[in-house]
Image (cartoon, coloured by chain):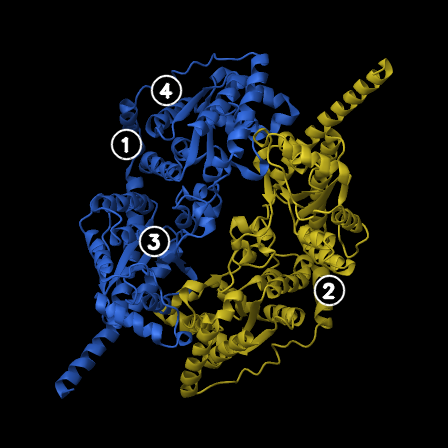
Chain colours: A yellow, B blue
């Protein structure tokens, strides 16, 4: 090395050193702000060809950050526990709470990348898959969870060389390698993987392209990774501010005006059109109830059901008879294979994550039934009416919920949704009866009376909900519930048909 | 049937009907009280020979209770996910929150019963096993979680007859049978099972005997089961009151006197005797650090480690250097296989359950490492000093913690526990340095200054803790930490030795 070269190198070293020091201070600052602020979470996916140094980069971040609000999430081939539920479940299960940073190895993009590299997916399929996950990421961003996808880029020959060297070295003296693409054994497949990564630059519909990180020089690679994390942290804070501003800027009057616009564009309120006079004789009820319950037992115990799951959501007016209907469903089920989830205010662990998390976390396994007494529709009902969610938030929830349900249905889950409707007079009569009867009194709270005063607001919200989330794969069933018995039969009948379909 | 017989029968029917009505009302009342009160949880284990009607009895309870605060927990042979952790994990994972009732099929007694029935365990082994679980149940009771074990009793011949009939009936029209004792194929084994159940009447050391429920008549059986549940619910409320009274009756002066008694009987405070002047040169540090980290990497990547897990608990004075020590441990570990848990105030889901639950829920799988920055010892440190726990509560925690650790160690987990000690002057110097340095400032809070004022109280608590929980299988290591580097080496050295041992 000439004197000049040497001088140049040590000057470069100095510059890198300064860059690193500044970066580490800024990183800790932003991490601390995130952890204190508790409004956002950050997920950084570290991917790249095997041999590019994903594990090393991860280690470097652990060295530079405070590990209390940091976690690593690793996804390989799904375990049996994971396979028993929809594919998204494992990612939702691990979703970091607001205030935390997750570094992720493996991700919801990996299957699509692998298929594309192995030539199993067309370019269109690949894009469609990425666009689907992009919708989920958009939702996460609105919920203040920011995701960045990094790709540690390294020429195939060099990556293979490093991989070989690492494998030949004494394994015990090295931390295990992060191997994600073991199946891509040919050069061609690996080239197609790299192409697929590049293609994310061309995707539309909100697909965030991979950030390409040149990885030949480990030190520069780690600096670049850390800089991306820093940028993501800053975006997370800015994003949370922007989301909060958007909420604050909707003045009550705007909200009302917008609500009016929504209402005008909605089809006529289906609930208002419902015939509430339907009823059934006691005799008919007894016979048909027995028959329907038997059929439901049959359907949930036959072999076919082991590959499916049943999800039943009950919404409706207070005192509409949800509890009684749930009991008749439950009576037909094996108590070891169902669970009833009463949905009220979220716990603090739930409140620290996007609103759908609490439903994902109790996703039934295949072969099981989950009954929700009130459900994810709370977002567009009580949260809307009581203004717990901003208009922006509940308005985007319609399509988010449709996406959410479609993921479960794609996993062969059967979703049945009920709105149990009673008249205002019938509700009053039932409230009064509850007050009078000892074993029912616990069902009536001051909230029930308060909600009754907001009857119209709830009816509007319910009407909009039904108009916007009545998917053919998960349709709403409006149940005329002034006659409890008629309602119970209708509920059972609908579930049975859902499972038979 | 003669006229008299008929009359008798309808009178009996009437009486049963009245008994049932009164029971159902009382059950709902108590369930409601439990759910509102949120101080206690109740677990009712429904066991018995196959064919005695466990599933039917369970269904009946679902019919009579409100299902919102009710859940069914089922335990068969452990799944892979469950086998990856200590045997107690799956029960802890599902522990109902206070306010809830769990009906349990299968339990922590079943393995012992099965072994005894198959002649694999001596009477002494059997008793010892039950007594071990009884200690856990005592702890649960103190934490307001009440457990009742029911045994639906039925003569073997009759049980077998029913089982056969049920199996021959059209399976689809019946709910699946609860089969727990399929391996007990001989009459003799089943007789020994029944004997073992009876034997629980003779056990000592707090083993609750099975409540024997005659199960020939299904209606009487279900009534008896419900009455046991009712009694347990009432005991739960009374127990919560008693626990609260016990706490309230300890006046501050009593507490101090009792504390004095504890202190007098304790060996001399080990922390006070610690030599804090130990140190290491920079050069030695660098060499030894590298060597120890390499060895730790080796030990946690070799095949043997896949059957074990490493659990490291850090306690110590504020600013004693826990974070720096943790980092040096972490650097040697695969980031995909460890997690650092910073323990501060519990979430509301954690606060709704016994204090050890939050540690069980993050039990590492085999092959993984869990590092706790502060730990389950908070119960006898901060909770004692700040009076978050009553003297009764923190005093019983010593043996509860010893039991807890032993369960992990029995599953081949290695537990290493550190107390990092610095002098009061050194702490002051470090606090001041933290205030001065931008990247460290976030580490210092007002709590730190307040805790500093309670130095003696913490030192006493720590001394007691070490004296009472220094188990040979999970010993404490006191680390002289005025020299951070010396402390880090000591920590690494101790972990390495723990894994080598």
> Which secondary structure lies at badge 4?
loop
Identify the mark at residue B107; answer none if there is no mark. Answer: 3
Task: Locate residue A223 relative to residue B297 in the image: left or right.
Answer: right
Cα separation, mark 4 vs mark 1, equals 26 Å
Mark 2 or 4: the one toward you: 4
Front residue of A79/A118: it is A118
> Which secondary structure lies at badge 3?
loop
Tell me, yes or no, if residue A182 can be seen here: yes
Q: Position of residue A18 (x, y in %)?
A: 75, 23
Identify the mark at residue B95; answer none if there is no mark. Answer: none
Mark 4 or 1: the one toward you: 4
Q: Label 4: which residue? A: B270
Q: Chain of mark 4?
A: B
Cα separation, mark 2 vs mark 1, equals 65 Å
Q: Chain of mark 2?
A: A
Are tags 2 and 4 found on a single chain? no
Q: Quadrant of residue A131?
A: bottom right
> Which secondary structure lies at badge 1?
helix
Q: Label 1: which residue? A: B254
Residue A231 in the image: above or below residue A343 = above
Mark 1 or 3: the one toward you: 3
Q: Chain of mark 1?
A: B
Residue A266 in the image: above or below residue B501 = below
Tell me, yes or no, if residue A138 can be seen here: no
Cα separation, mark 4 vs mark 3, equals 41 Å
Give the quadrant of the N terminus of chain B: bottom left
Q: Position of residue A290 (x, y in %)?
A: 41, 80
Residue A86 in the image: above or below residue A73 = below
Q: Label 2: which residue? A: A257
Mark 2 or 3: the one toward you: 3
């Amino acid at each position: 090395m000439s004197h000049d070269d040497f001088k140049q190198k040590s000057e470069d070293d100095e510059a890198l050193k300064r860059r690193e020091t500044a970066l580490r201070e800024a990183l800790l600052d932003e991490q601390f702000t995130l952890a204190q602020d508790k409004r956002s979470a950050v997920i950084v996916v570290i991917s790249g060809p095997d041999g590019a140094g994903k594990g090393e980069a991860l280690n470097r971040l652990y060295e530079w950050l405070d590990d209390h609000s940091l976690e690593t999430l690793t996804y390989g081939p799904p375990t049996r526990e994971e396979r028993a539920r929809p594919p998204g479940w494992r990612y939702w299960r691990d979703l970091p709470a607001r205030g935390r940073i997750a570094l992720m190895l493996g991700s919801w993009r990996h299957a699509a990348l692998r298929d594309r590299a192995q030539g199993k997916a067309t370019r269109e399929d690949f894009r469609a898959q990425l666009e689907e996950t992009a919708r989920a990421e958009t939702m996460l961003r609105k919920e203040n969870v920011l995701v960045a996808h990094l790709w540690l880029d390294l020429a195939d020959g060099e990556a293979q060389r490093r991989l070989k060297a690492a494998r030949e070295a004494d394994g015990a003296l090295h931390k295990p390698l992060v191997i994600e693409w073991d199946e891509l054994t040919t050069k061609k497949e690996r080239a197609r993987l790299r192409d697929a990564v590049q293609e994310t630059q061309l995707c539309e519909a909100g697909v965030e392209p991979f950030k390409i990180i040149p990885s030949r020089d480990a030190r520069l690679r780690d600096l670049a990774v850390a800089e991306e994390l820093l940028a993501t942290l800053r975006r997370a804070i800015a994003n949370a501010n922007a989301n909060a501003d958007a909420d604050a800027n909707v003045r009550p009057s705007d909200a009302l005006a917008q609500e009016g616009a929504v209402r005008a564009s909605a089809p006529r309120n289906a609930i208002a059109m419902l015939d509430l006079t339907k009823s059934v004789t006691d005799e008919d009820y007894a016979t048909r109830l027995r028959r329907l319950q038997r059929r439901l037992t049959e359907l949930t115990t036959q072999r076919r059901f082991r590959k499916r799951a049943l999800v039943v959501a009950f919404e409706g007016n207070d005192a509409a008879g949800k509890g009684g209907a749930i009991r008749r469903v439950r009576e037909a089920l094996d108590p070891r294979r169902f669970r009833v989830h009463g949905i009220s205010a979220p716990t603090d662990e739930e409140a620290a994550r996007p609103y759908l998390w609490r439903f994902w976390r109790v996703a039934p396994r295949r072969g099981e039934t989950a009954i929700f007494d009130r459900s994810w529709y709370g977002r567009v009902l009580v949260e809307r009416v009581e203004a717990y969610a901003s208009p922006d938030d509940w308005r985007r929830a319609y399509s988010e919920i449709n996406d959410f349900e479609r993921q479960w249905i794609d996993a062969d889950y059967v979703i049945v949704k009920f709105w149990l409707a009673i008249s205002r007079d019938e509700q009053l009569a039932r409230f009064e009866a509850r007050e009078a009867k000892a074993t029912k009194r616990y069902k009536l709270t001051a909230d029930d009376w308060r909600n009754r005063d907001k009857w119209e607001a709830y009816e509007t919200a319910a009407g909009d909900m039904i108009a916007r989330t009545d998917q053919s794969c998960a349709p709403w069933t409006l149940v005329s519930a002034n006659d409890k018995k008629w309602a119970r039969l209708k509920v059972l009948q609908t579930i049975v048909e859902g499972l038979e379909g």
